[in-house]
Amino acid sequence: MKTFKLYSLSLLEGKGECVDQRLIPIHDGLIINMENSNQTWYIEAVISKDYCEYFKEIKENKGHILVDVIITSKDNHPAAMITNVQTITELSEHISVLLEAKLALKRDVIIEDVLKDLVKEGYSEEQLLTEFRNKMENLAAHPQSALNTIYRSIKESGEYNLQ
């Protein structure tokens, strides 16, 4: 089992054919890789009470949320995860939300999408290589095409109740 500091948490919400990212400011948080055969992760985020009703509704509907998380520092690449709400604990000034999660997007897929986007933009040869290195070094979010694809495939799979 490995535990990391949760640096950021964003909701990935489907809007027609596209996915919008909504950053949830976090007061504190952890993310735990259980390192088990199910590849389970747990995300605990201490956030504003303003989000209490949103998460309660997801939990009551046994819904799933697609999220993007960054661990430890802003310099790390994001990880897209499909989650469900396990518990909501009211604290004095915030709430603590515990999400059970699985990785929804592997790093190889992200790299492939970055490369496809650059080719579509007309880059080739040395220019393509230079731009690819820059994009990968500065990848603060997943390429929009990757988010749209993963959201659509999760929704169409019928395996999850995306909210």
Image (cartoon, rainbow, N blue to C red):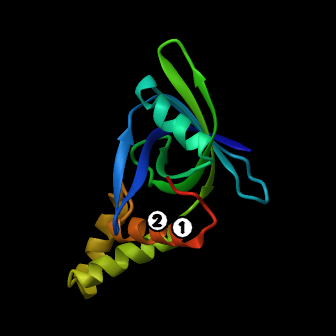
Nearest the viewer among 145 and 74 is 145
x, y percent for residue 139: 36, 59
How many C-alpha atoms fall within 10 Å of the one at disc 1: few (<14), some, or many (≥20)? some
Label count reads: 2
Q: What label does residue 65 carry, if any?
A: none
Relative vertical location of residue 132 with respect to residue 162 in this rendering, above or below: below
Q: What label does residue 151 carry, if any?
A: 2
* Residue occupying the far bottom of the picture: 125
Q: Residue at x 60, y 68 (%)?
A: 158
Name the secondary structure under disc 1.
helix
Q: CA distance from mark 2 to mark 1?
A: 5 Å
x, y percent for residue 119: 28, 84
Question: Label 1 is placed on what type of residue?
Answer: Ile
Question: Label 2 is placed on what type of residue?
Answer: Tyr
CB within 8 Å, label 2 to label 1: yes
The quarter holding residue 60 reads top right
Q: Is residue 92 left or right of residue 129?
A: right
Q: Residue at x 69, y 43 (%)?
A: 2
Q: What label does residue 154 carry, if any?
A: 1
* Residue occupying the far top of the picture: 92
Q: Residue at x 39, y 33 (%)?
A: 25
The quarter holding residue 124 reads bottom left
Nearest the viewer among 34 and 91 is 91
Q: Residue at x 63, y 56 (%)?
A: 102
How many C-alpha atoms fall within 10 Å of the one at disc 2: few (<14), some, or many (≥20)? many
